[in-house]
Amino acid sequence: MDKRYAMLIDLDKCIGCRACELACKQENSVKPRVGETCDFEKTGVPFWLKVYTAGPFGEYPNLTMHYYPTLCMHCDDPPCMDECPNDAIYQRPDGIVLIDKGKCDGARKCIDACPYPGVLWHDFDEGWTEKCTFCYHRLDEGQDPACVYHCPGKALYFGDINDSKSGISQRLEANRKYLLNIPTAPHLQAVPSVYHILRKRQAGHVGVVA
Amino acid sequence: MGTDGIKIIKTNCFECHSKCGVLGHVKNGKLIKIEGNPEEPRSKGMICSKGFSAIQMLYSPDRLNYPLRRTNPKKGPGEDPGWKKISWDEAIDIIVDKILKYREEYGPQSIVVGQGTGRGTNQWAQRLGNSIGHNHWCCPAHVCLLPIMMTSMLTTGFFAMWDSPDQINSKCYVNWGSNSCWTEAGYAVAGIREMLERGDKIIVVDPRYEMPLAHKADVWLPLRPGSDGALALSWIHVIISENLYQKEFVKQWTNGPFLVRLDNGKLLTEEDALQGGDELKYMIWDEKSNTPKVADSKGADPVLLGGFTVNGIKCKPAFQILADQAAEYPPEKAEKITWVSADRIYKAARMYAECSPGACLDAMQGVEETATNTSTIHALLILMMLTGNLDAKGGNLWYVFWNEMLGPRLVGETPATQEKYRLGKEQGVLLYPVSQPKAVWEAILTGKPYPIKMYINVAGNPLSWCENTKLTRKALEKLEFLVTVDYVMSPTAELSDLVLPSAHWTERDYIADELCKRWEMAQVRCVDPVFERHSDITFFRTVGHRVNPEYWPWETDEELFDFQLEPYNITWEQLKKQYIVETAPEKYEKYKEWGIKTPTGKFEIYCKIFADVGADPIPKYQELPQTPISRPDLAKKYPLILTSGMRMPSYYHSGMRFIPWVRAMYPYPVAQINPKAAKQYGIRQNDWIWIETTNGRAKHRAFLSNGIHPQVVGAPHGWWSGCKELNLPGFPNDEANINCCIPSEEFGKVLGTSTMRGLLCKIYPVKEEK
């Protein structure tokens, strides 16, 4: 069977330090941008990986909360790929979804098509849209993606989910009942390859991103 | 060197004290990437967002590159300093001339050496002071480091805080007024992540829910800022009254059994008990013989509780007095003072005690930055004593560098006049061994008790770190000669007469020592320094060598490193080759072999030195100067409680706001307020607001959060700099500087600390100014 790369994010271990965001920026030379210099409505959020805080929910001091890292979900049958008018988005046999920057003309249909928040962003200076590549250049050299390698809380797991013996497969199996259901547009067959698990799940927690 | 032309340099980060092990990737003499080094035994390959910003820090256009000399003597807002570029050697000549001139005319005490939190050179800054002739060490140590370090050294003989929690072997982690997950991940997170994986117990004591661990905790104690002392005593009460303490440990290793005279509060000595007795021997009550005996008498079984009369003197064991004082704060009563529900207090205290020995406690600036810090910190150390966690596996460990760092070998001999010229002494600061910053500013302004003429400020920005910014600014504007050595043109550098460019950690050699647990590491440079930047070590050594070569005999930095490394039988050359050296073996309960380095030879429930200077020898709780309880009158005008110094993971104190990568993560100074408070005061999300206290005000952006009590405002520190690349504003004239809000008059007597957490404030929207 072909490899199918996936990421598992253990939210019980994510400490919200956002080191992954900068590991990603350094590795992939992602430009820093903030709201004042770009319009998120038009550009998407200028991170390939971003940690949100879900919550706090409830009334002080009876609260719940978790951190929630988001990145490209590298979906099976990715809607962004279908919607790109220039065929600039393609999927490798191992499941990684990539944008060919040379073909991208900045139509930004992908940003609208993606059912997940904060995944793609468009660089008006360069005229292309970009997103997480699962650090395929590192994978091809036998290394984990930069965010996984550097996560201080060791909350990120990466590997081949088609291999039932891989660490990620076993961890996913053991925690299947703790998987977070991420609300997606149901008509899209966007089955993600990024899994979030949360054992301390409580009412009001699920999928809410602040 | 790899085939791709990339050279990998094994070194340690210094974007903060944590000094995580990193691998610098260098190509064609340029640093292109920083990765974590999995071989480093503490951090195990992780680094944080601060570390990742190293490349942008090294090559930032905002960095200082050449020494600059002021040509316009007028200082202050709107004055152009008229900077003139000079050479490094010229700058050092000027500094040495000034030191010699002022020392001759006004005495060595007229020259201050200071720093901020610094960049790992505490010992060398103090050594320069000592070598000039007086060690002021004007720095924020009164609110950061010395409260926990001194209280711990005085009562346990070692530094049982900061990097001491042995999370990796622990069953229970208490995170009390500390955000180590974000600020100094290197010493904490590698252990905490194992604890999370294992499902160990986590207890968080913090007013803010939006810190990294509160939501993961088994118990979160959301206390009123500054009420930590009452909470700690309440834990002590639960642990003693429910018999959850390690009785044998307390009897044998603490001075809990020592008898305290009820007439004068002093320890009962053998001299008090019988004629011709030794005044340095302390007495216990022996249960077996029902008689008083000298502590540690063979076969004696000391009692911990009760009241006795010896030679006509009424006394009680120190432990009994502790129990009495703690009994004033049963959880039901503590709930009213601290706002933490009694059931949470019971649950946490029992959890900590039941996991002991093998439970560790991590307390930092949340407990340091108040006027009553020493009592609170002593109470926390007593918790470790009661539960037998001092230097126990999984508890709070003894790392030897701390005993060495501020000792005379590295700091140099302190001149005999140190106490005579210690600023703050006349204002009543009892035990702070160097000058209280506030007293330094006052001496600059008044010339009393003696004139201050020169201030050498290395890796520091007092206009950011010091409370009561107005006073600091006034003093620095008046000062005759201010030297600043730093990465960038900070607000303090702008007021300087001479500014020198400091080399970044990626371009300097140094030894990673403090916070490195039982190791020291070679922090070698990745690239050679560019422009005329030099290492802070080089600065201290070259100035010192010319002023006092007896203190500074070393011709090169390498010779200085060799000197520091002597106790570990290794040279700098060797350390560079092997990267790391063990400074102590992995061993627990070292006090059994080495002895306990306190005045009474025991872990001190009764702190002898506090007693000697007239401070509380056994912790008592006292309300802070400005709270709704201590000042109900003031609370009418200032109804909210401010806790300042709220940390973000991507900033090291007042630095780094000019670095685009990290500034994009946290673009503005945000104050956390509860939506209920926001509604009451007409504030919407992201509005600019003023936080105002009796001392002044500072501008922040409102961030509404359920994670904070409706009566509490959380605010960060360190905001001054803009970020050109992101077109984000700076905050000139201290307008977003939270230290403008912190009064300096009502400080704690023991260490001279002002209250930065737990003082009264009010908030209101910033009106558009036309």
Image: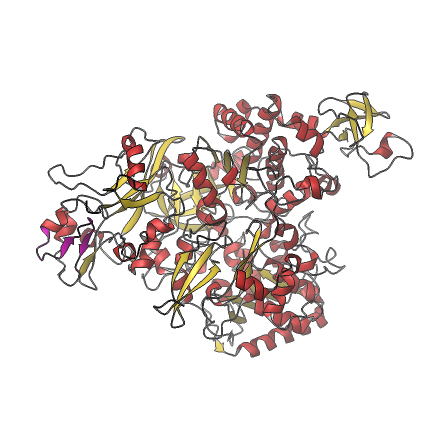
Q: Looking at this view, is B723 or B449 the one in front?
A: B723
**Quadrant where the N terminus of chain A is found in the figure:** top left
In reply to whether residue A89 is colored magenta, the answer given is: yes
Q: Which x, y percent locates residue B570?
A: 62, 61
Q: Which x, y percent locates residue B748?
A: 62, 44
Which region is colored magenta? Answer: A83-100
- Examine the rendering and report whether any part of residue B481 can be seen: no
Relative to B727, say whether A48 is above or below.
above
Give the number of callouts. 0
Q: Which x, y percent locates residue B356?
A: 56, 30
Relative to B698, say whether B279 is above or below.
above
In reply to whether residue B735 is colored magenta, the answer given is: no
Relative to B257, say whether A103 is above or below.
below
Outermost residue toward the left in this view = A85
Q: Looking at this view, is B333 or B39 the one in front?
A: B39
- Examine the rendering and report whether any part of residue A171 can be seen: yes
Q: Looking at this view, is B521 or B88 the one in front?
A: B521
Q: Quadrant of residue B32?
A: bottom left
Q: Which x, y percent locates residue B78?
A: 44, 68
Instruction: Determine the main secondary structure of the stretch shown in magenta.
Output: loop
Outermost residue toward the right in this view = B276
**Image position of B642 (left or right of A62):** right
* Colour pattern of the rendering: secondary structure
Q: Looking at this view, is B146 or B74 the one in front?
A: B146
**Quadrant where the C terminus of chain A is found in the figure:** top left
Residue at 40% x, 35% y is B216
**Image position of B75 (left or right of A198):** right
